[in-house]
Image (cartoon, rainbow, N blue to C red):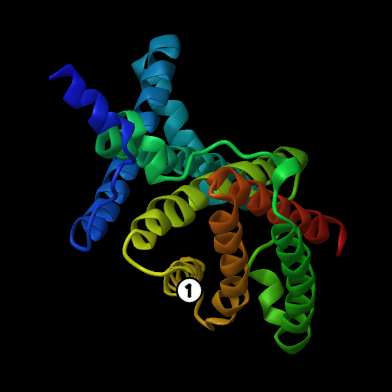
Amino acid sequence: MEAEIGERDAGPARPYGWIGLPLSLVLIVVLGLLLSGFALGLVFLGGAAILGWHEASVRAANLIQAMQGDPRTGEFVALILGILVYAAFALAVFALARFRGGANWRDLVAWHPWSLGRTPRSCWVTVVAAMIYSLVANAALAYFYPASQEWITVPQGLPAISVFFVIATISAPLTEELIFRGWLYTALRDKLRFAPCLVSVSALFAVAHWEPTHLYALVVFPVGLALGFIRERTGSLKASISFHALYNGVAFVLMLFGK
């Protein structure tokens, strides 16, 4: 029996099939929301344990009123909640990967070692090309559709800017890559050739950045292609997370100092 278990654990973990994959995505969403609510509940209970139930309730009510009356307060609280939600969804993906893959859970999200020095040259070319494309695409979008500059703006005040930076360079790259280039890409790559898998995941990634004009999704789509290519060539999600963080970091700096 032990030998059988050892042989089973030695092989790569298999992702869910065509039916299990969409169901697993629904489960990730549900689990992420539940974990977010659980974390908020723990924060409130912690406050109640320190301040007392009545005082914690009063302060929570005051915070809600402050958020409604002061846009900057509301924005800051929303950013803090954003970090919490991103963390909850990342944990949900890790948890489901561990449940599905057991000891080999890393195979399901390509959580494999990655060396910066051994990154293929084609990946560096892709990084440079994506950066240049982003600068040109955003400049063209700003020129032909100035309203696009209001889609994503840097908040005011050092605390809010700091939290926004954390979201842009840590929370968003980690969680988005876990879902798209990790969970989704691994499952689809098990069933499809590279090109259709890359296009499919990149299209879903673009849809996730949807806004009413669809323009932002079109801008994001090639970036998704670049991230998927890096994921494929390196075999590691850590590489696409790093590039995603770099890409967002550059965008953050340009937004912060480009006004």
Judge left or right: residue 146 versus residue 28.
right
The residue under label 1 is: 195
Q: Quadrant of the C terminus?
A: bottom right
Q: How many C-alpha atoms fall within 10 Å of the one at disc 1: few (<14), some, or many (≥20)? A: few
Residue 134 position, x and y percent, is 73, 71
The tally of labels here is 1
Residue at 43 percent across and 74 percent down: it is 196
Residue at 52 percent across and 81 percent down: it is 214
Residue 57 position, x and y percent, is 38, 26
- Looking at the image, the residue that sits furthest to the bottom is 144
- Looking at the image, the residue that sits furthest to the left is 1
Residue 248 position, x and y percent, is 69, 55
Image quarter of residue 152: bottom right
Q: Nearer the viewer, residue 115 or 160?
A: 115
Q: Quadrant of the N terminus?
A: top left
Is residue 84 shown above or below 210? above
Q: Nearer the viewer, residue 138 or 109?
A: 109
Residue type at mark 1 is: Ala
- Per the image, label 1 sits on a secondary structure element best described as helix
